[in-house]
Image (cartoon, rainbow, N blue to C red):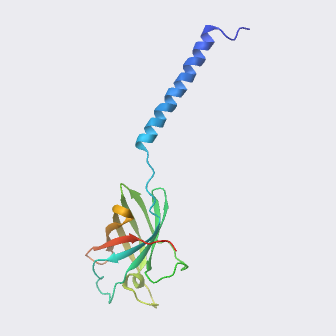
Amino acid sequence: MNHFNLKSLTFYGVAITSVLVLFKTVTVYGEKNLKAPPPINGQYRLTLSENLPNCEKSDTLTLNIQQSGIYLNASVLPANANSGTDENHSLAGIFQNQQLNLSGKVGRAILCNIPHPQNDPLNLVTIQMQLVDKGNMTGHLTVKGIPQTLRFTAVPQKAN
């Protein structure tokens, strides 16, 4: 029972070397090409560049984003809503190439700053944002039924 013959040593040497080379190749590729997206979860203050049509007053809004990798859940709230407000994440989207795309439904009362509406219809909303310096974002908001897109800026809010 000679376990140290030349064939066995050659086989094990080649197998171990192949595994090490493969591991090194995958590691170099991963470090070079696979990067985690920057964290963007948190609250942002949305300031619209103009009022929505048929709204008395569009106030500053709060966009609350929760992130899991490149996938996003978000909700739009009035700026004066307290942090304990029970919110449902009605917007979903994805974060790729420094761009966020969110879509879902938001109440008209939230967009128009109407206190305590009786029958609050939901508007289908699409938000596209580009990440710029210091976590600030610029983008545009599209509301179904309104032909124009509304430009806005989003500034991160400090956590209390």
> What residue sits 36% from the left and 54% below the top?
97
Q: As displayed, is residue 119 above or below residue 151? A: below
Q: Quadrant of residue 130?
A: bottom left
Q: Position of residue 45 (x, y in %)?
A: 40, 75
- Name which quarter of the figure residue 115 lies in: bottom left
Q: Viewed as shown, does residue 71 lie left or right of 144?
A: right
Give x and y (percent) for residue 152.
31, 73
Residue that appears at 35% across and 66% down? 137
Q: Residue furthest right?
A: 1
Q: Is residue 147 left or right of residue 69?
A: left
Q: Picture coordinates of residue 131 (x, y %)?
A: 35, 62
Classify 116 as above or below 76. Answer: below
Residue reaching furthest to the left: 148
Q: Residue at (36%, 69%) from the top-left corner?
A: 126
Left or right: 109 in relation to 5: left
Residue 66 percent location from the top left of the image: 49, 65
User: Which quadrant of the figure contains the N terminus?
Assistant: top right
Relative vertical location of residue 17 with respect to residue 92 in this rendering, above or below? above
Q: Quadrant of residue 147?
A: bottom left
Residue that appears at 36% across and 71% down: 154
Number of on-image labels = 0
Q: Nearer the viewer, residue 33 or 119?
A: 33
Judge by depth and name the residue closer to the eye, 144 or 83: 83
